[in-house]
Amino acid sequence: MSTKKATVYRMVMPKHLCPYGLKTVDLLKREGFEVEDRHLTTREETDAFKKKRGVETTPQTFIDGKRIGGYDDLREHFGKSRSQPKEGETSYQPVIAIFGVAFLLGLAISLYVFDTIFTVQAIEWFVSLSMALLAIQKLQDVRSFSTMFLNYDLLARRWIPYGFVYPFGEALAGVLMVAHALPILSVPVSLFIGTVGAVSVFKAVYIDKRELKCACVGGNSNVPLGFVSLTENLFMIGMGLWMGAKALGFTAM
């Protein structure tokens, strides 16, 4: 059986080591290729290579003398998904990661406090931690978030500062609900921003039929506005109603 061979040209300089070059070599080896790893050790050498090959970036991979392209092109060549979405592409991965970690944290806290994961509190912590984690994403760049938020939030369009206030309110409600503290503050905040958000998303997606990106994980996300965005707001409404009912003594849990 003949050995599959590939040639990779990548930048390996004293002050710069291209991470995608390393990933390219690793991927080829995992796919069973013998890799001829050619280093471009200076900026001049890199520029000369790109000019000669008529390419704009490195690394570049060649298999059987045919140019495959960069790292994402190589992944597509092997039938794998791209490491980065193309311009305009959307992905639920950020939301899945946040909800997944929040869910596991809720179970972990429940196990530590009650010696079991099967508690109502585990669900409460899951939702409240999700709110806090989503708020962190927004607070990393509030200006960018508020700009994307204006695309669909009905209140933010009427009162611009609401886009700046929203992530702080979400963080406050989430943290207080994790601690089961000050429901007189956390409940109305959660109900208000959740209701406004749910109405805004429903109108934009299901009535106006607009295809937008959601600011739920920050202003630079590729998460599509839709069911997941609506779910986030329904979570806040549900958590507000639940914590309010507990505070008023309507439930013994």
Image (cartoon, grey):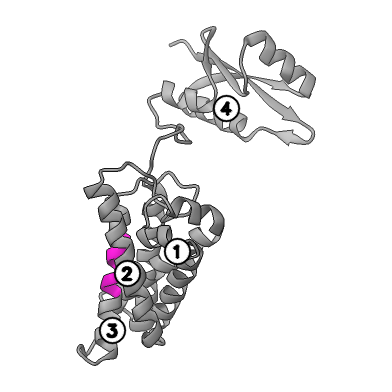
Crowd class of label 2 (few under 14; some 14 to 19; many from 20; radius 10 Å):
many
Quadrant including the N terminus: top left
Residue 28's spot in the image, x, y percent?
A: 51, 25
Residue pictured at 79% horizontal, 19% vertical: 44
Task: Report if the CB atoms under discs 2 and 4 are less than 8 Å apart.
Answer: no
Counting residues from the N terminus, which is met first, the one under dot 1 or under dot 3? 1
Image side of residue 103 versus residue 242, left or right: right
Counting residues from the N terminus, which is met first, the one under dot 4 or under dot 1? 4
Residue 112's spot in the image, x, y percent?
A: 39, 79
For mark 1, give the secondary structure. Answer: loop
Residue highlighted by disc 1: 159
Residue highlighted by disc 4: 25
Give the label, 4 or 1, closer to the camera.
1
Residue numbers of the magenta segment: 232-239
Residue 7's spot in the image, x, y percent?
A: 59, 16
Tell whether position 149 is magenta: no
Q: Amino acid at mark 1?
A: Trp
For mark 4, give the secondary structure. Answer: helix
Residue highlighted by disc 3: 244
Q: Amino acid at mark 2?
A: Met
Give the label, 2 or 1, closer to the camera.
1
Counting residues from the N terminus, which is met first, the one under dot 2 or under dot 1? 1
Residue pictured at 76% horizontal, 24% vertical: 41
Residue pictured at 61% horizontal, 29% vertical: 21
Counting residues from the N terminus, which is met first, the one under dot 3 or under dot 2? 2
Give the label, 2 or 4, closer to the camera.
2
Quadrant including the C terminus: bottom left
Residue highlighted by disc 2: 236
**Residue 222 found in image quarter:** top left
Q: CA distance from mark 2 to mark 1?
A: 21 Å
Tell whether position 233 is magenta: yes
Q: Amino acid at mark 3?
A: Gly
